[in-house]
Amino acid sequence: MRRLTIAAAAMLSLSACQTVQNTAGTPTTYTDPGTLGPVKGVGIESQDVISMTDQMMRDMLAEPRLGNAATAPNVIIDAEYFVNESSSRINRNTITDRLRVGLQRAAQGRMQFVGRHYANMVQAERNLKRQGVVDQGKNPTAQAQKGGDYRLGGRITSLDARDAKSGMTSRYTQIVFEMADLESGEIVWSGIYEFSKAATDDVIYR
Amino acid sequence: MPRSSLLARLAVTTTLAALLAACQTTREQETQVKPEVARDYLADKPQPLKRHFMVALTQGQRNQVLNDMRLGLASMEMGETALAEHLFDDALTNIETVYVDKPEAAEARSLFAKEAVKDFKGEPYERAMAYYYRGLLYLKAGDYDNARASFKGGFIQDSFAEEDQNRADFGLLQFLQGWASRCRGNDVTAQDDFKEFKAINDHFTLPAAGDNVLVLAETGSAPIKFSQADNGGSTPKYLKIRRASASETARINFTETLAPAVKKGEKPKPATTQHQTLALSQLEDIYFQASTRGGRQFDSILQGKADFKGASDTVGNAALIAAAAAATVAANQNNRERQRDTAAAAGALLLVGLMAKGIAAATEAEADTRYWDNLPDRVHALTVKLPDGIKTLSVDFMAADGTVLRTREASVTRAGPCGLAWVRGDNAMPGNPRAPNSVPRDKMYDPVALPPPPSETGSALPGDKPAEYAPKPGDQPAAPQS
């Protein structure tokens, strides 16, 4: 009995001294960006970006004025008018780039994409061609860069709540996508993606 | 019981007690890092901060957020913007990570480990300030969306306060949300933000219509954390905050060049200069934010630890008194058999007493007092309309009686429609490479050794000749082979 007591005390004392530091580190592993990753919070994460852009892409192509027009419309999809008013810091290009790439691949010519974010690059090359510094290339010359028929706009907003007693934090995030007619201002297509996340941090941080 | 056996048991008991009392987790210690790893890590770090980054490397994950915050701020002041952005991003990622079932967190809750073994995330005022600085970096870069998101994220951190009246009252961050919205051209949101700010701080003047530069001047030193028991007791030692510096104010001076209007046919008139001095108003009191939070939920854990510590100590005292009494009885016994039994009982009681005392001594009911030591005490601000030609402002920092304590220069950074001038009254360079209380007290001022430069042999490649075959001083170079 006494030996048992001593052994228990020794284990107790050693457990108090144990180290939990992960000095060895964790090897790099590929994770599926479409699923919940090992580091979690309540903000916008990779799986949200992937599912929202996939959903918006399908929805946009189903709109006849965009995905089934007699003449393929020129669309501009970038982050210039895509506003982040939420409490999540995010590079908005992450969303609009994926949407543009996905759409371009799926549209198969039903829409034409204008790279307005490359306007300076294009203009610089056009200037060099017209100055005779470089030749005209193989493509036919254009009067001007393409104008857009429709342009993406949108807004990310969030509502945050916290229960001071339980320490639970929740964030409702709403992302609105809209395509505006660049002549009339009419919004020809809208899409919304929303999600809410809640988490409670360990009591040691409350 | 043989005397030797009794002595052996006593020795075991004493060892156990000593083990418990001297117990210190290795999480609190700095680790050894291979010189080549340290050299790679330090290669792109600014020279004045190399020792600080070396400490950050050796202190690891436990103090990562703390080191990111203080070195991020120091880098920001030095103009190392990209490094500061990286460090604050890293800090915020860790702050936003929700800790669930983490062994490090479980250890901090355990009886025999200090709260300070946990990974540092800071108290709400420190987390809010990390968002504040990240937001300023976004403002400098003209990314007003993410600036506002950062300020909003910091404001949410303040909602942790236990006391209702002090919850979500970080006016600085609410004001900056409005400023960022305004710079983005989002006037509706800006109006909403400023309306909410006014509900918190009615004294500060909102930006006038043409204002295009925000001036922020930070004064004083960081609030200091310490642990102290309530009502003169000894445990538990709760987290307390005290102010470290006296009140200061600030004003800006600049000279504006005014070109007089010239009518048609008139000769151009020479430009005139106009000197202006504008006072800044206090926008936030960081000490107030730090000290008005109220209790923490972790305090109940500290209370539990303290109760256990007290109970163990009482049991230990009672057992030791009983052991002494039993030993006295044993000494006065005439019957050898009874004497032996009583002595054995005294030994057992001594064992229990020492163990209980040892457990009580090893129970850690003390709050974590690591803190962000290069934060300011107060933030003063002003919005003003400045022509693009004004690139710098002269900022006077003054004592409460108006005496000018020092004058510094603030650069006006313009990356979008709005400019930002941010300046500190005190240098943001941390004096000690180690953050306060980030390691056990006896290690706080240990010298920090930087890795030696790679030696000739250290940079040898596989297949190179061993060092003993290397040419020695005075050797003649080998003649080229034909």
Image (tube, rainbow, N blue to C red):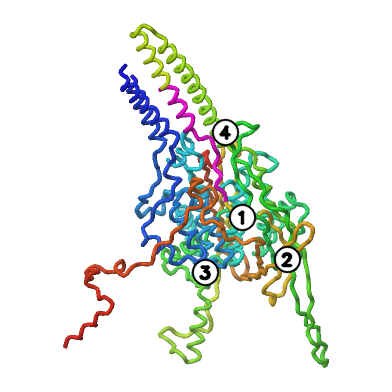
Residue behind mark 1:
B375
Q: State if disc 1 and disc 3 touch (CB < 8 Å).
A: no
- How packed mark 3 is, by other alpha carbons closer than 10 Å (few <14, some 14-19, many 20 or more), is many
Residue B345's image quarter?
Answer: top left
Residue A52 image position (x, y, % from top left): 48, 55
Residue A102 image position (x, y, % from top left): 43, 62
Residue behind mark 4:
B236
Q: Nearer the viewer, mark 3 or mark 2?
A: 2
Q: Is residue A62 visible?
A: no
Q: Residue at x 44, y 56 (%)?
A: B57
Spatial CA distance of label 3 from label 1 is 48 Å
Asked if labels 4 and 1 share a chain, the reply is yes
Q: Which residues are drawn in magenta?
A: B351-371
Q: Nearer the viewer, mark 3 or mark 1?
A: 1
Spatial CA distance of label 2 from label 4 is 44 Å
Residue behind mark 3:
A75
Disc 3 is placed on an element classified as strand
Q: Quadrant of the C terminus of chain B?
A: bottom left
Q: Which chain letter matches label 4?
A: B
Spatial CA distance of label 4 from label 1 is 27 Å
**Earlier sequence position, callout 4 versus callout 1:** 4
Q: Which chain letter matches label 3?
A: A
Q: Which chain letter matches label 1?
A: B
Identify the mark at residue B396; answer none if there is no mark. 2
Task: Decide whether residue B63 is among the magenta residues.
Answer: no
* Residue at the top extreme of this rendering: B335
Q: On screen, B125 above or below A134?
A: above
Q: Is residue B436 visible?
A: yes
* Residue type, mark 3 in image: Val
Between residues B59 and B475, which one lies in front from this camera angle?
A: B475
* Residue type, mark 4 in image: Pro
Between residues A146 and B470, which one lies in front from this camera angle?
A: B470
